[in-house]
Image (spheres, rainbow, N blue to C red):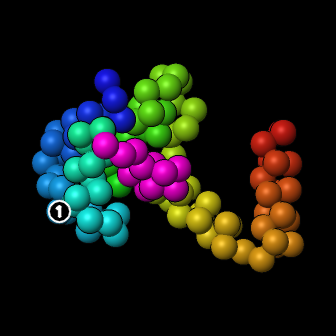
Amino acid sequence: MSIGERIREVRKRKKITLAILGKSLGISLGAISAWEVGRNIPNGDMMGKLAVTLDVPVNWLMDTSSSGEYTISKEVYGLAKAIDSLPEEDRQTVINVLNAIKKK
């Protein structure tokens, strides 16, 4: 199953129209339609937004491993965006702290 077919499947299962999904992502319904029919694919940032908006793992959208390794919650996605917007020195400090926690 392609990325577009997966987007369409979950969108329809959740009863979300192209217009509603487009509005929540800040893009046109034509862009989503192009993904669904395979004329285009979402970029990495948009793939993350799609996963959060549709409440599915990124790896499911991309048809990669089913381990759930890339599953993120809306809260984690929001925190990642906030960290990404920090000045470089602050961002690196946060990354260092998170890496230290991960090693425990």
Write down the quadrant of residue 92 in the picture: bottom right
Q: Quadrant of residue 27?
A: bottom left
Which residue is situated farthest in the bottom direction here? 87
At x 67%, y 66%, the residue is 84
Residue plotted at (47% across, 40% down): 58
Q: Is residue 10 visible?
A: no
Residue 31 image offset from top left, x and y in percent:
29, 57
Residue 85 within the magenta-colored segment of the rendering = no
Q: Residue beneath label 1, please?
A: 19
Picture coordinates of residue 41, whole percent (x, y): 40, 45
Query: Which quarter of the rendering shows the C terminus?
Result: top right
Q: Main secondary structure of the magenta part?
A: helix
Quadrant location of the N terminus? Answer: top left
Q: Is residue 35 left or right of residue 51?
A: left
Can residue 45 be seen at all in this image of the molecule? yes
Compare residues 78 and 59 and report the one nearer the observer: 59
Q: Residue at x 25, y 42 (%)?
A: 36
Q: Position of residue 33 (x, y in %)?
A: 22, 50
Q: Is residue 46 magenta?
A: yes
Residue bounds of the magenta highlight = 39-51
- Seen in the image, is 30 located left or right of residue 68? left
Residue under the image location 85 percent in, 56 percent down:
96
Q: Residue 61 location, x and y as percent? A: 40, 36
Residue 90's image quarter?
Answer: bottom right
Kindly identify the amino acid type of the residue bearing the numbered disc 1.
Ala
